[in-house]
Amino acid sequence: MIQVRFVLRELRYGGAQALTFILCVALSIATLTALNSFRSDVHRSLLNDAQKLHGGDVIIHSHYPISEPLEQAVRDIQSRAGADLARVYGFNSVVRPEVADGSLFVNIMAVAPGYPLYGSVDLASGRPFGEVLQAGAVVVAPEVLSRLSLRIGDRLRIGTAVLTIVDTIDYDPSRPVSIFSLGPRIFTSTGDLEQMGLLGVGSRSHYEILLRLPEPEQARKIAETLSRVATAGQERVETATTARSQVKRFFDNMLFFLSFISIFTLLLSGIGMQSSLSALLRQKQYTIAIGKTVGATYRFLLLHYLALTMLLGLIGAIAGVLAGLIIKSTFPLLFGEIIPAELMLGVTIGDLVEGMLIGLLVVVLFSSLPLYRIAAIRPVALLRLDLTGNVGKPATYLLAALVVVFLALLVVRQLEDVQTGLVFMLGCLGFIAIIFLLTSLVLRLLRALPVGNLAMRQAFRSLFRPGNATRSIIVTLASALSVLLTIFLLEFNLVASFITSYPKDAPNLFSLDIQRGQQEAFFAAVGKEAELFPVVRGRLLSINGEAIDYERENQRRSDSLAREFNLTYRDTLLDDEIIVRGERLFEASRPASDVVEVSVLDTIAEIGDIDLGDRLVFSIQGLPMTAEVTSIRSRTKSKLYPFFYFVFAEEVLAAAPHTFFAALHLERDAIDETITRIVTALPNVSTLNVADTVVRLGELIDRLARVITFFSLFSIVAGCLILIGSVLATRLERIRDCAYYKIVGGTTRFVLSITVYENLLLGMTSSILAAAVAIVSSWLICSAWFNIAFRLHGGALVIMALTTCAAVVGIGLISSLSIVRQKPVTFLYRQNG
Amino acid sequence: MTAAILVSSRLSKTYQIGGRQLPVLSDISLTVSRGEFVVITGNSGSGKTTLLSVLSGLDRPSSGTIRLADRDITELSEDELAPLRNELIGFVFQAFHLIPSLNALENVMFPAELKKDPAAGDKATRLLERVGLSMRRQHMVSELSGGEKQRVAICRALINDPPLVFADEPTGNLDSTNSREIMSLLLELQRERDATLVLATHSREIARQADREVRLADGRLVSGEAS
């Protein structure tokens, strides 16, 4: 039976330790609650409304006109199941005003009457979309008007057609977020498609058939039926819930990454919880020892202190859930245009219950070791004035293993992916283990360092004061800071490589879909000859007989093997290419065979585990083609230069339907004029201003970096709480040392200088370790993943080190002030009872 | 008689506990001469430790004055008292109060280092040799016995050659053999250095060795107030 009075009395005298514990619990679940609740919102509005996002229950997608067998199957379903149908054609192009100057890269969606089958496209005028969008008319995103200085009623050249702007889009259900789109959206009627002349063979158009079923739950079954007649590797039949979407994919990736950070914060807060609860129990150890002396059993004490811990945990969990909701309310400001406007940020009972349960589970796990230590406090210790109990190593390891297992389960649950979850756990533990080892090494060096200055020497000694959480503080701060600094260095290097230091000779204009016979006109439009890369669209069907698993590929976070590739042909390497496997692009002499040769770029070879001699089957215009890998290439320049994953010999693809791609470098102020000349001469050619796109990419990187930094800051708070917890845990020892210093003649200034030096050492060690780890990890990511040059940002390192030292010294001083101010005699009287 | 090193006049100390005033010391006037060995005796709770604390400037009296080496220390702040304690006073406590993160030698050196004495190490080594602890000088406090800890504490009290040493029950935590050894060591060193020793004790045996015994009862001097 729990004696409530005992628990409440212990709580009343818990003081700052109890408060720190509550804050750690709150911190551990605040970001997790905010993210989980946000994830529910995203799922609700993007996934549950997937029909609106994709426009139907079943979506048929192809880069070519839909094949006749599939068309027939669709007609059968229409007549049999009474499904509604809408056709959509999408492509990118450059449009220009009929009379004025200027041009704009846009995304065009030609839709048939009946679109959208779900939801509605809201127009600024408030009129129904279906009524407004008639042949000869276009509805445009507001950006089209502002960037081309046009008004409603003006006319726009799209391809070879001239259409009238009749309205602007307020809300487009298929494009909840526009930050990832290369160009603003324009809706046209399918009736104008022929006149536009932009659906050329091999152009990057997509053809879609959307079906609305009377019984949407039949979607999966019908999709399977249609898939059986669809052309493999060319036509994709999906349901609204399985279909890929850039927005869904982005949010999945972002939430996935932010979950990493919030679990990392939880781990660090857990360390804080453990150290503040240890401090609280250290304060109570006299009570515990006396309790045992007068007959309290371990079970009684454990039960009551567990009740006390759970009570504090409950307060912390409630505070954490509330803080999580407050954090979530800042998301619109934090994420800005990344969040779809219609995304409702609400709170469900489920969010609250989940947050509370995670919080209490976290409390139980991270409190188990300090609570177990109660068993080690012996009554006889009262006589020896030595109350520090030691717990056997097996129990410590067992409890640590339990914590790891719990975290692994939580990670898997958060990331919804067992393999990635376990890899993350191992990575996280490895990361912390590396910092732990480095910290131990540095502390060993510090211990052996001869120090002349008395106050400094005492500060060094204080680091090794029994019960001091020196190692925990440094590991926590260094881990959190290194994550923060790594993110900063990555952002800095990405921006520096792609935006600030955009290579002078790098192409800044990409032209796609140049048809055979348009080369000369293209050169005339750009005013010079340029290298044209032939492009044949094709899909990969299998690797060594193993069919590409489209479902699995769609889940992949890196590039997907299921997508349509740009294949090319040539017999030589590009200037920035080298062969890394094999002798040359293609074998010199090869007997005639049905199997052709292909050279593969190392990045895609790595994704598909492709090696020399492997057999790849491609689908080109629906026809299968088997190729053997004869070389693997790598690139020496950044991704701003054109590259192709798969290169074939000229005789293999030269006869296939293909277009050309050009990558040009122009003077910046000549770009807009050149685009207008190209679109005037060759309306079907899509030209992209890469320099502009790069600036937009920079803005996106900046926004994402801000989001990640925001979440990483909570890890820093965890580090600060551990610091406060450590000061509290060693409060008695600090008061004692302080009294001794003063008794033998030390002034307040001397005592304060020891505190400053001690915290300065903590801050400096944490910063130096964080900087070292961040430099190595960001260098690795830059060179191995992004393939960009790594540059160090000395200013950031100095600012991080100075801020950390100032914060640690400040927090250390503030939490030690009451200790330093104590008169030595107070300690002496207390010692005398 | 030699000049006085410590003079207290009408000292009182009262604690406020809840709403109640609790007098611990009342109207204590005491003069201690240079080189003198004075013991303060009395029953438990008679105010011995409080008197020692107030006389040494560790605690502030509620009323009255204290002059230490011809200087009024009654109203001095903590930071003004600190250097005085460092140079003029040595302390020996029943519970030793050594700094646990330092070894024996460093504990002894500490007050001299605070004074920035370049010979701190040599002086501490000599003192430890003098008390028979040269072999234990690198040992941490936790590795020393009670008697050894008190010897280290005596060395620490004497490292700056203070004219005045306060000792509060220095043998209270020791067995009888160690008590005798520590007392004779303390007295030897006090005489060698011509220091003044003010010692609080219950022990009649120690009191008999003193030049003068000052007896306290309920916070008042009942005998020995005259120097």
Image (tube, coloured by chain):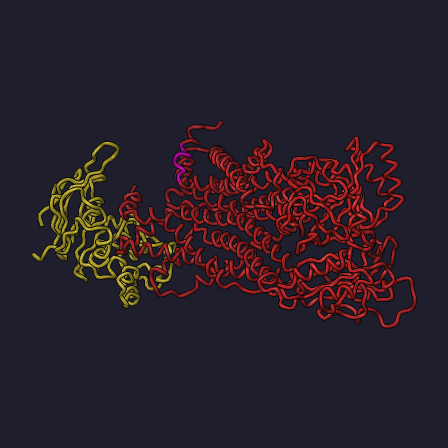
Chain colours: A red, B yellow
Up/down of A806 relative to B51, above or below: below
Q: Main secondary structure of the magenta part?
A: helix
Q: Position of residue A325 (x, y in %)?
A: 53, 37
Number of marks in the rendered image: 0
- Which residues are drawn in magenta? A9-15
Quadrant of res A758: bottom left
Q: Position of residue A52 (x, y in %)?
A: 71, 38
For the view shown, which residue lies furthest in the right direction?
A592
Tell me, yes or no, whether the highlighted magenta stretch contains residue A612. no
For the view shown, which residue lies furthest in the front direction?
A99
Along the line of sight, the residue nearer the viewer: A682 or B50: A682
Q: Position of residue A746 (x, y in %)?
A: 28, 56
Along the line of sight, the residue nearer the viewer: B33 or A738: A738
Up/down of A215 relative to A237, above or below: above
Residue B203 in sight in this render = no
Quadrant of res A33: top right
Q: Position of residue A63 (x, y in %)?
A: 80, 50
Along the line of sight, the residue nearer the viewer: B148 or A424: A424
For the view shown, which residue lies furthest in the left direction?
B1
Question: On the rendered structure, is A285 left or right of A368?
Answer: left
Q: Residue at x 20, y 34 (%)?
A: B21
Q: Give the quadrant of the C terminus of chain A.
A: top left
